[in-house]
Image (cartoon, helix red, strand yellow):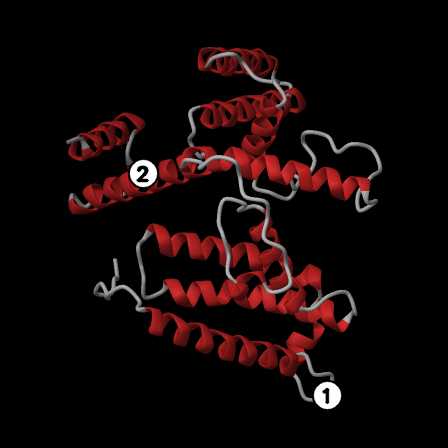
């Protein structure tokens, strides 16, 4: 793990200088991207790209940011954040060339949205610009209450957008706005959370756990029949119910699965290392031998 020494908190003067430097470097980045896309003197590869061809890179870079955070690699972290920022700038450049919007619109939209969703915070002119300060909330909210306020404001925004014709004219459904392209476990958790907001949920967590067992039993029935199509359908129900259970327990199913993957990788590599010390290869060992070494590795991890 790589880390940098802790630095003192930023002073107000340094904060102002950092913002000025940020504005300058954002301008440089925007100019760089425009140059890369120049029809005559730009980069041949960058000129060929479209919204669709570069979209996967945004997902890849987001996961690399997450990886740097989990490894607490603060040296790599700003580099990975920069790669992710580049994807935003790239998409905005393409949109500006098409006359749709520009990076300035992206920054303005997200700033005004954050102002709207924080009515409990008083902003200065440096933040508000031409935007109006939201009506203050009647009472001071705790950090625990913030997600509820956030979701309520988002729901109001969705309704206004639908009424203005930005979406279908009918009232948006409870599941509207959950992108189908999300990782499946994350999407399942968000869908279950949205459904729970309108009362489509078990009264207590035991009901969700019972549902997990029910779905596993239904999968086992189809597995006995060896019906692959129905097995896929039922296994999907198992995974969805597990994601719902994680949501009910306030656990991130993606984080849970990442942790399990990391644990499996760590233990598997330890098994390989132990066998290699004895001059053995994994392929030549019996299942019983591998299971014994695996359990021995597990024991070394226990506190």
Using a 10 Å C-alpha cutoff, classify the residue at mark 1 as few (fewer than 14 neighbours), some (14 to 19) or many (20 or more): few
| Pointer 2 residue | 263
Q: Nearer the viewer, residue 95 or 273?
A: 95
In this rendering, position of residue 73 left or right of residue 122: left
| Pointer 1 residue | 40
Q: Quadrant of the C terminus?
A: top left
Residue depicted at x 27% and y 25%: 288
In this rendering, position of residue 201 left or right of residue 158: left
Percent coordinates x, y for residue 248 in the rendering: 47, 23
Residue depicted at x 61% and y 18%: 199
The kind of secondary structure element at disc 2 is helix
Percent coordinates x, y for residue 150 in the rendering: 55, 39
Q: Is residue 269 visible?
A: yes
Q: Nearer the viewer, residue 122 or 4?
A: 122
Is 29 above or below relative to 66?
below
Is 202 above or below relative to 60?
above
Labels 1, 2: front one? 1
């Amino acid at each position: 793990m790589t880390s940098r020494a802790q630095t003192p908190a930023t002073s107000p003067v340094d904060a102002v200088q950092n913002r000025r430097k940020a504005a300058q470097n954002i301008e440089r980045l925007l100019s760089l991207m425009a140059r890369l896309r120049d029809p005559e003197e730009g980069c041949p590869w960058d000129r060929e790209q479209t919204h669709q061809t570069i979209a996967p890179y945004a997902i890849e870079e987001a996961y690399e940011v997450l990886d740097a955070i989990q490894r607490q690699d603060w040296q790599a972290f700003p580099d990975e954040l920069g790669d992710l920022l580049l994807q935003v700038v790239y998409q905005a450049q393409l949109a500006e060339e098409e006359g749709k919007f520009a990076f300035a619109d992206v920054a303005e939209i997200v700033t005004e949205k954050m102002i709207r969703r924080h009515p409990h915070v008083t902003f200065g002119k440096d933040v508000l610009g031409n935007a109006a300060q939201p009506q203050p909330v009647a009472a001071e909210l705790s950090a625990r209450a913030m997600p509820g306020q956030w979701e309520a404001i988002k729901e109001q925004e969705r309704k206004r957008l639908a009424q203005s014709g930005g979406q279908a004219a009918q009232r948006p459904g409870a599941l509207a706005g959950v992108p189908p392209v999300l990782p499946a476990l994350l999407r399942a958790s968000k869908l279950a959370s949205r459904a729970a907001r309108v009362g489509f949920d078990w009264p207590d967590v035991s009901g969700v756990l019972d549902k997990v067992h029910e779905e596993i039993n239904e999968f086992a029935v189809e597995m006995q029949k060896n019906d692959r199509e129905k097995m896929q359908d039922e296994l999907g129900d198992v995974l969805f119910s597990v994601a719902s259970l994680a949501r009910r327990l306030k656990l991130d199913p993606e984080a849970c699965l990442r942790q399990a993957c990391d644990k499996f990788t760590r233990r598997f590599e330890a098994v390989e290392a132990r066998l290699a010390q004895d001059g053995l290869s994994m392929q030549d060992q019996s299942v019983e031998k591998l299971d014994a070494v695996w359990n021995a590795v597990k024991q070394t991890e226990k506190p």
